Amino acid sequence: AATTPELADKKKYPYFFRTVPSDNAVNPAILKLLKHYHWKRVGTLTQDVQRFSEVRNDLTGVLYGEDIEISDTESFSNDPCTSVKKLKGNDVRIILGQFDEEMAVKVFCCAYDEEMYGSKYQWIIPGWYENLWWESWINSSQCLSKNLLAAMEGYIGVDFEPLSSKIIKTISGRTPQQYEKEYNAKRGDGQSSKFHGYAYDGIWVIAKTLQRAMKYLNATNKHQKIEDFNYTNHRLGKIFLDAMNETNFFGVTGQVVFRNGERMGTIKFTQFQERKEVKVGEYNAVADTLEIINNSIRFQGLEPPKDKTIIQEELRKISLPLYSILSALTILGMIMASAFLFFNIKNRNQKLIKMSSPYMNNLIILGGMLSYASIFLFGLDGSFVSEKTFETLCTVRTWILTVGYTTAFGAMFAKTWRVHAIFKNVKMKKKIIKDQKLLVIVGGMLLIDLCILICWQVVDPLRRTVEKYNMEPDPAGRDISIRPILEHCENTHMTIWLGIVYAYKGLLMLFGCFLAWETRNVSIPTLNDSKYIGMSVYNVGIMCIIGAAVSFLTRDQPNVQFCIVALVIIFCSTITLCLVFVPKLITLRTNPDAATQNRRFQFTQNQKKEDSKTSTSVTSVNQASTSRLEGLQSENHRLRMKITELDKDLEEVTMQLQDTPEKTTYIKQNHYQDLNDILSIRNFTDSKDGEKAILKNHLDQNPPAQWGSSDPSRTSKDPIEDINSPEHIQRRLSLQLPILHHAYLPSIGGVDASCASPCVSPSASPRHRHVPPSFRVMVSGL
């Protein structure tokens, strides 16, 4: 009944036969069990005792070459916890243990502490322990009984079968069940041994061997008998060995066969279920077959444990409903951009649209549509396209988004630069900047983009990379671990290239902000978009910063990352297009006349920075200060009112002279003062030549007071010489006053330019308008 594997060494013990299977006999049964459940990766935990070490070594040889890996081999003397922890660290799920009952209690306590039990682990240990073996050693451990039982639940014990379970008559004429009943009846209250069946079959082995040897001797050598046997007779020894090796009959322990002196018996499998061991299967070493009793073995999971942590790589992909929703929003944005394009083309001849550069507007729309289109490409991952196609998309979507951004904002900033160049022209010279020049500017910006992108593609192109994340438990509860993988578009020097692109785009944004700030006071809505550019740059800048930060933080969550990137692009493109075109659309719809009339433009310069005046528009019309224009209009109105009053006085004087000629000698002084007032009105253009009227100068040299003096010496002169006589005065005034009236009024805009009078051409400037010589003579005469 010795089961130690050491006795199997035929070099030391050539004549040794055992009727009980050795401890090594369980190893072929274990191999069969491993293959049955497709366990190809195991670990061993062995107590440092020769008996267990030999079984472990034999097991290593049995498993070698059977495509079963022993991933870790651990041994211990007294404390198994360190070895148990190493097994867990090496992800050993199927543990083959070789230790006695005392160490078994400690092992399962350590397993409980390390959570190496349950549906993910399977322990296979010796099955020859006594019944309720753990109760004898529970007090020596530091874990609770319930914890120990929880860790032990489901372990499989392997040991030889004491009696055959088959209902077949044995060589003795009894079935194993009949033998067991008779044995128990004769044993009475004595202690039972599990080897009694093997002892019973061992007697039959001896009997059959002697019978075969005697038969052989009788057939070959009639002069030698079995009684002549001694331990020095090698010939009889050889006959006995051959007879033992030929032994083959069905006993109470099963089929009795020897192979190299080892009993080929039946190995049973038991499982610890609810605090008791239940037989779940048996292995027939002779036939090399394994039989699992139907529905007897219970695994704590839905299926047998895996021999290792099954890592299932799962691509984190973008949700199809999310992609559909964002694609729908993108399509709506492209429809809106198309509507703006139709509006811009249809109304390109309207002054409102024409002054806002329709070609540049088309480029802004084109850039927005390219940005929208990039969203479709950002949402395509490995679940939609192949790896090669995904790598191509990495480059295409980067180019489209970069070019779209530069096209939209480059066109917008080019328009603002034109406004800045025109209204910052201090020399007040005529300046015309055509759209062709703006297209060249936008083309230059795009050329810089292309140079960066081409260098990027040639030197360090974007590649598809796969990032693997930490394993996660299966959401469905299966005994597998999910390793999420995520596709990225990256290259060796990704940070450097992104830094170059961001730096260029940042400088472009700063340049746009500078132009918007410089032209903020240009109050020409149809020409200046600085306010909307500022709003657009602010919104785009803030959203890009937030979007880039959040996108980087959520790079392991493709749905969140794609949602943020798509929403940022949609928001930035939509807000930019709306800020540029919605005001124009509203203006044309609500006030079409105001959009087409030829208005005077106004520009106010910041006086704290510049003292020079600026007044140049796209149509090159010289602008005047609003305050000066209002002052001149007020002065013109006042002079017109004064002319009206003086016209009445002139008419009154004329009527008096015509109706009462005899009273002309006594013309009142105030009438002549009124005449002087008429001739002393200054020209509103501040002309140096027109400081005072000629007639007023003449009257200043000849004071009016002389007109009314009655010098006796002058009455006696000749009438021809008396030019101041009432008759002469009446004649001269009747002729000269109408002439003076018409000669003066054109200088202050009092008569129409087409009047048929002795005045000068109405096209002449007031400051260059002179009194004709004939008029000057007449006034002098007066």
Image: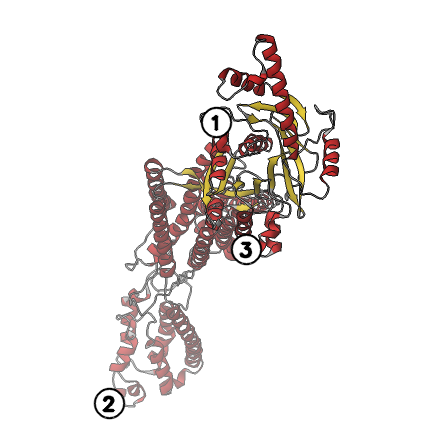
Q: Dot 2, crowdedness within 10 Å: few (<14), some or many (≥20)? A: few
The image position of residue 696, as x and y in percent, is: 29, 78
Q: Dot 1, crowdedness within 10 Å: few (<14), some or many (≥20)? A: few
Q: Dot 2: what SS?
A: helix
**Which of 714 and 226 lies nearest the eye of the viewer?**
226
Badge 2 is on which residue?
713
Residue 389 in view (yes/no): no
C-alpha distance separating marks 2 and 3? 166 Å
Q: Dot 1: what SS?
A: loop
Answer yes or no: do the residues labelled 2 and 3 have beta carbons within 8 Å? no
C-alpha distance separating marks 3 and 1? 40 Å
> What amino acid is at disc 3?
Ser
Badge 1 is on which residue?
13
Q: Dot 3: what SS?
A: helix
> What amino acid is at disc 2?
Ser
* Mark closest to the chain's N terminus, 3 or 1: 1
Number of marks drawn: 3
From the viewer's perspective, tell me whether residue 451 is left or right of residue 203.
left
